[in-house]
Image (tube, rainbow, N blue to C red):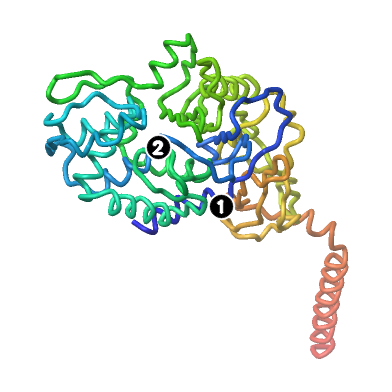
Amino acid sequence: MKKYIIAFLCFFFIIGATVYAESFELKSAHALLINLDEQKILYEKDADTKTSIASLTKIMTAIVTLENISSLDDSVILNEKDFRGLAEANAAVAGFQIGEKVTYRDLLYGLMLPSGAEAAQALTRVVANNRETFVAKMNEKAKELGLTNTNFINETGLDVENHYSSLKDVAKMFQYALQNEEFKKIIQSSSYQVSNGSKTLHSTVSRNMKKNNITMDYLIGGKTGTTENAGLCLASIASANGSNYMLITTGAPQENNNPYNFLDTKTIYDYYIEHFEIQTLVEEGEEILTLNTRYAKEEQLSFQSPESISKYLLKDYPKNEVKMEYLGVQEINYDTPQNTKLGTLKIIVEGETLKTLDIILTEQLHFDIQKYLIANPIVIVCALLLIFVLITSIYFSIKKRKTKKG
């Protein structure tokens, strides 16, 4: 398990932002857009700074729950402790009731869709008996995932001193959570009917978009968050034109009921979907290299790409800027064995090595003696001298025998 986590986290140590002149402005104080297919940051705004993340905290609450229960169908009876302090904090709730019998699955949907704080506190109680133990598990998991700018004090995300994260840490946490199929199913749901049939839970993402007439057909799912310190927050995943994205925004102002977290999210997604696309830079079977031969009937050998090579780029990116850098033998000798590796070819885009291909001799060359002799006239001279010597030797040998007989 730890090896998997380390491999997963390696992505976050090698990705970097590709800088383009974006023509948009944001209300959000922090933003981070990642191309999940190439595992590359496309855009970031103050994404390393420690900040309040409100209910985005509940992503970690869900992770700890999913990794510390045996069955999502096990039942839980809610009690007064699960609701304590929530009304005073004006916290969002899912609508569960004291004494209600629900499942872990119900609570997880209540946690993620309507962002129910009572669901969070109930999970804390039944998973770890108390907040201190549960939060310790949250911070332990944060350390395991390499979240160096994160510290949790509670499971709900309500404002409290020393409870913080950064957008890059939230991205690690969110992408890790998405490896769990149940979490992924929950985050992509717009509604859910609880197991006892008492209510239907609705996603705050879907509800806010409908309420404010915001259309993002490419949006797959997400999690909202709002507190005084964190402002308006939104973590989302999207898919468009064959590309998959993750976008996190926090710190949007709460002004006149404007949904700036959704408006900023739409602004960023729309910009990149409009201006960027996956471009095929090299087609499968396309000639990528030609090498001369030595003493072979074949004058030259051409090599083709064994695969298509694509990259997410500006739509008007000039393909003539794609560079190919070959390192290897410059001339193939006629007796080079078949399947010999001749060298490597790097496909370079924007200064980055996109792909490295091995150049393999896939056929046996045929020797051309005429080319060999033309290139090596001394061989002809030596051959003629040898013939002359042989003829002379034979001549004198015959003459000598005749002289003896006479």
Nearer to the camera, 108 or 17: 108
Which label number is shown at residue 158? 2
Q: Mark 2: which amino acid?
A: Leu
Q: Secondary structure at mark 1?
A: helix
Q: Residue 132 placed where, x, y %?
A: 30, 53
**Looking at the image, do the residues carrying marks 2 and 1 touch, with CB atoms under 8 Å apart?**
no
Q: Is residue 369 above or below residue 184?
A: below
Q: Residue 277 placed where, x, y %?
A: 60, 25
Residue reaching furthest to the front: 88
Quadrant in which the N terminus is drawn? bottom left
Q: Mark 1: which amino acid?
A: Phe
Kindly tell me whether residue 354 is visible in this rendering. yes
Residue reaching furthest to the bottom: 404
Q: At x 82% / y 80%, what residue is drawn? A: 393
- Marks 2 and 1, the one that precedes in the sequence: 1
Quadrant in which the C terminus is drawn? bottom right
Q: Which residue is mark 1?
A: 13
Kindly tell me whether residue 178 is visible in this rendering. no
Q: At x 59% / y 45%, what residue is drawn? A: 48
Q: At x 64% / y 60%, what residue is drawn? A: 336
Q: Residue 241 placed where, x, y %?
A: 53, 22
Nearer to the camera, 273 or 112: 112
